[in-house]
Image (cartoon, coloured by chain):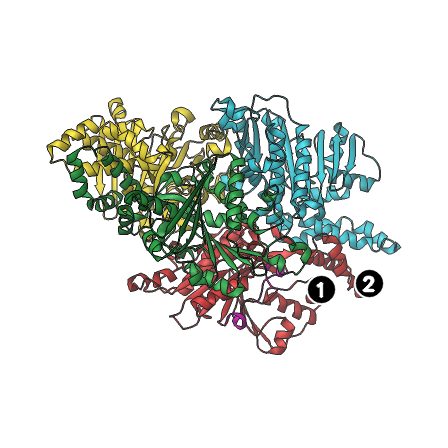
Chain colours: A cyan, B yellow, C green, D red
């Protein structure tokens, strides 16, 4: 658990359940009790279902009991649009399996994050693209809404822009429109640069407090909102502290054969967090790492997610016509 | 009342109290009972205070009892920035006179309208510029907030984008953050092209249902929100139906000396609305008229209004440093 | 020719050849010598090929000798995406028929207009969506570019933003990259509100000076640039002066049976332009009329045009995968 | 020169002359012949004038002979607007000292970088804010232009958006409008996180090929454009490779007292670049590090730079009214 302790000491979290699990298992070298993991490898992607079954698993994994599905698809970073479509369909299938049966109440899609900051704008961009229908349902014209679900969507902005906590805005809207489900889309931080813009996580537990870019997200879950929350998140950054830590560790790994170094390793362990903080002064834990082409990657991802959501929600939307329904 | 009837028959309203009054008086040629009007002409602008005193006045004026202050400043359309600043100060003074004394609860600024449509984006742009401080107040650090009021701000988007009525979003937020006042900024429709981007109306009555561009605004007032609402609105369009009607009337006016025409005028009165509808098919009452330079005019106006609000609300913001506080 | 004279007297032009022809023929009631017109009516659209054959036709039509193809599809204003696709294919077919055979030099797509003003942002939006490949060709990697043409694209902005005439910027770039063709996309002004966002004009003559919204466009044609220019334009506004004029004329038409009126009509003809100017003071000929939903209509149109261009230019792009290639 | 070699081995450069100098001197511990450096420390900032005097200095510093002025002002990262104004004035004074005397030809401001990627959007944002006057000069109305210089501005976009090299676009425009000077504004990469959004470099040498975020900038200098080029650049990112390298080095520095380590340091030197590449796979040298609040920092910087340029260029613009002239 060294890395999780390390991140916690910097006020950071591991946003992806799959990464939390990898780190826990990797370090312990043993299965984590209370956590079930099933992997399904395909040509273009790998699907990992992490299920946290009980309080012991939740404590180890530092996140609530529930299902966490991750689609790892490094090929998403290519411009191959037919693979984007394939991932969109997978996301749609997985999302469908989490949807409530209640078709009469609206579903509220929430785009978390700051539209002025490229890597944090994923949620707002998904909301821009996604099909919204609630206003048509309010016209009470069946011919318009046949084959569609009742969907509303909002990007509440971030605290620094509105002066209002996201959860206050969303809770206020939920109280007014009484949705059967909230789908919250968010940009995440990964522990590994390989996952930037290449993994999509679905969780039926909502958004945990302190997650997301800037670990400033308030909790957005059933406990707070009173309705189920599905979180869809993608890493768009890695915290610079992790880059620094990984570098030192890879460096040290070069010398594990040496007894002296092993000795050193043990004694120095605690010093790493301090060292990392020094390297990243004066920005400490607010420095994030992104690829330069992040704007293009985010646009692609936002379309994949908006398409996946739209396909999952509306019977009348089909893989062959989904692009037509995205704004 | 011919023009108000005419507009109503097309599903349109007169957004500016000053124009409603001009039209009523102009046609009747007499004072309207229950309405007090005081004008104050200066070099660069004219200030008109319309006060609706009782139900009779409200019925005639088709809007609630309350104060409506209009700053008419055609010079706002110039690029003369020192005059922009002068109007900003006037707006600030007038706004101050309407503010509540309660300094402990936040003030919520709401930017109504559609940020994707230039003439309707005035409200969202003001929210972009305006100083927001509520998150600083929540830090409980007096040195940060001394001399400032607690201000939050949001642009809720329009129904077609979110699927949620503006009033549902705002009522939800008001219930959560319990402001002492809502200031709602909106783009309006004028009855006269001369007022486009040159008049600013302040009203202590909030937003009446059916006003604004597209006359699709829900009511946003004390009755609905439970807190006082000050509306700040500027005309950014004229409905094309009014252009058509004005044209016919100016045309007819050329012939008022002729007895035959006068006769005709009387008989044709009712036909005008039908004719106007024909001219504007297939868009009927959704066609609006704007100057081509609307983007520049809106930016200027948004800065004047955001500056006026920021000056009025915060003791520490002064005319000489207000630009520094705008985003 | 009354209306063309009227518009000219206000400094305005008729941007669509089909409208110029309708007005000329309508008024004269006879064929215009030197102009060939063929119409082709389909279920969802009408195709009109106007060909100006000689100088006489050019003088009458107030535009250069050449081909002007108009797709009139009022159904474009609906949100029916499969019809959008149908129009995209038609546009693509028509554009193909105008393309040069030279495949070795790049094609430069130019998005004219002001991205800050919704109805004028059509060109820049098309450039945002359209597939650009020239940088891939410069990598000299055949596997990347097989089946594609070499395409560059730019939105030069407008004079008020850059201080530079569009033609100076484009001529400068043309001199550097030596394209075989320029495709210039522009928002136009229509003479009839029914054509707003429902007609697309292709012209092999380029952009004539003084056309477009704000009739401030410089000429962008073979004479100026030294390479052929295909113009793709859609009306997104009607000049308010035309609304005013149409209103008066429809009004007068109600009374053509009356001898007195006919008499009057003849005497008043000249006064109309003056009257219209009065109605539209102080904005005179810069007032434009747009539907309120212009932002949505422009986005749809931009996708149809970007898709049509992308399909026409690249062999490897097919109707079933074109959406994947748009940004 | 180890770090410069290291960066070069990753295809990266040191954009700031002051950092190149610090690194060279730091490592050599001696003065660099052919380079003159004068520092001037004030309360809120430090001014460093690096002058490369001859070919020897140029070779060492890996950049052309010329003047490089850096304003280091970490306080720029605060929201203290009166300090922003102070830095704006300093920038303006320094820029003035580099301006040509020729007042008759226009000055062209070029905003380099990608407006879709927050840390790279500095140049385009400066162009958005800066005062443009060339179109007014073309009206030949002295009363409009008295006290102002003739200024044009453009953001050419990046290769991936247009398919055209920036230098092709700018050279094309320069050939057409014949400016006396180009001022190119660009986002840079720093070698030290402390300089992100806190340093501004002015250079009379223009933009060297390979500099800037993504080290994809073409050269934009007198040799290429035929007119003098002043470059204004601010670091908005640090390359992640540098973070990784700095971490290892700080780590190693902890053990310099140990003889064994010193030995190791010498043998491992070459391995670091390989190691860093491994850590940053699969993104290698395209990963950049930015603070999360980069959007706000960039907006502040863009205003400081646009204000500094506007003040320097126009006699009629004064510190007390400069905000009025920014868009």
Q: Residue D264: give its label.
A: 2
Tell us which disc is closer to us: 2 or 1: 1
Q: Looking at the rendering, which quadrant does residue C141 occupy?
A: bottom right
Which residue sits at x=42%, y=26%? B225
Measured Cα–Cα span from mark 2 to mark 1 = 21 Å
Q: Judging from the image, what secondary structure is the residue with disc 2 in?
A: helix
Please state which of residues C266 and B305 is positioned toward the viewer in this rendering. Answer: C266
Residue D33 in view in this figure: no
Q: Residues within 10 Å of mark 2 (few under 14, many from 20)?
A: few
Give the left or right position of residue D104, taking residue C127 as reference. Answer: left
> Does the stretch in magenta take in D42?
no
Image location (x, y in percent) of residue C100:
53, 57
Identify the residue under disc 1.
D9
Image location (x, y in percent) of residue B151:
45, 38
The quadrant in which the N terminus of chain B is found is top left
In this rendering, the answer to whether C283 lies above or below C222 is: above
| Chain letter of the residue carrying label 2 | D
Please state which of residues A186 and C186 is positioned toward the viewer in this rendering. Answer: C186
Name the N-terminal-most of marks 2 and 1. Answer: 1
| Chain letter of the residue carrying label 1 | D
In this rendering, the answer to whether D155 lies above or below B327 is: below
Image location (x, y in percent) of residue B215:
37, 31
Give the left or right position of residue A278, taking residue B283 as reference. Answer: right
Q: Residue A327: give its label.
A: none
In this rendering, the answer to whether A117 lies above or below C142 is: above
Residue B240 in view in this figure: yes
Give the left or right position of residue C55, taking residue D155 as reference. Answer: left
Image location (x, y in percent) of residue D80:
48, 52
Q: Residues within 10 Å of mark 1 (few under 14, many from 20)?
A: few
Please state which of residues B175 and B189 is positioned toward the viewer in this rendering. Answer: B189
Task: Give, as a single range, the part of the protein colored magenta.
Answer: D210-225
Q: Looking at the rendering, which quadrant does residue B67 occupy?
A: top left
């Amino acid at each position: 658990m060294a890395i999780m302790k390390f991140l916690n000491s910097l006020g950071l979290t591991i946003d992806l359940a799959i990464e939390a699990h990898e780190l826990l298992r990797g370090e312990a070298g043993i299965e984590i009790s209370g956590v079930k993991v099933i992997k399904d490898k395909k040509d273009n992607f790998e699907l990992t279902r992490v299920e946290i079954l009980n309080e012991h698993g939740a404590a180890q994994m530092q996140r609530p009991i529930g299902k966490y599905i991750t689609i790892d698809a490094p090929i998403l970073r290519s411009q191959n649009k037919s693979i984007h479509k394939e991932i969109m369909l997978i996301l749609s299938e997985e999302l469908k399996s989490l949807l409530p049966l209640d078709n009469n109440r609206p579903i509220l899609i929430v785009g978390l994050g700051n539209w002025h900051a490229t890597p944090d704008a994923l949620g707002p961009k998904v909301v821009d693209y996604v099909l919204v229908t609630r206003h048509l349902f309010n016209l009470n014209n069946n011919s318009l809404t046949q084959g569609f679900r009742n969907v509303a969507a909002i990007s509440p902005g971030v605290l620094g822009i509105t002066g209002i906590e996201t959860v206050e805005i969303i809770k206020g809207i939920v109280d007014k429109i009484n949705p059967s489900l909230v789908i919250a889309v968010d940009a995440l931080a990964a522990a590994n640069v390989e996952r930037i813009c290449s993994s999509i996580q679905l969780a039926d537990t909502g958004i945990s407090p302190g997650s997301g870019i800037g670990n400033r997200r308030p909790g957005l879950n059933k406990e707070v909102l009173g309705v189920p929350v599905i979180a869809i998140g993608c890493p768009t950054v890695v915290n610079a502290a992790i880059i620094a830590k990984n570098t030192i560790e890879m460096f040290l790994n070069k010398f594990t054969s040496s007894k002296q170094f092993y000795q050193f390793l043990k004694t120095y362990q605690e010093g790493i967090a301090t060292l990392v903080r020094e390297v990243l002064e004066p920005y400490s834990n607010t420095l994030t790492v992104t690829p330069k082409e992040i704007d293009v990657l985010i646009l692609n991802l936002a379309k994949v997610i908006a398409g996946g959501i739209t396909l999952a929600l509306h019977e009348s939307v089909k893989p062959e016509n989904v692009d037509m329904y995205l704004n």
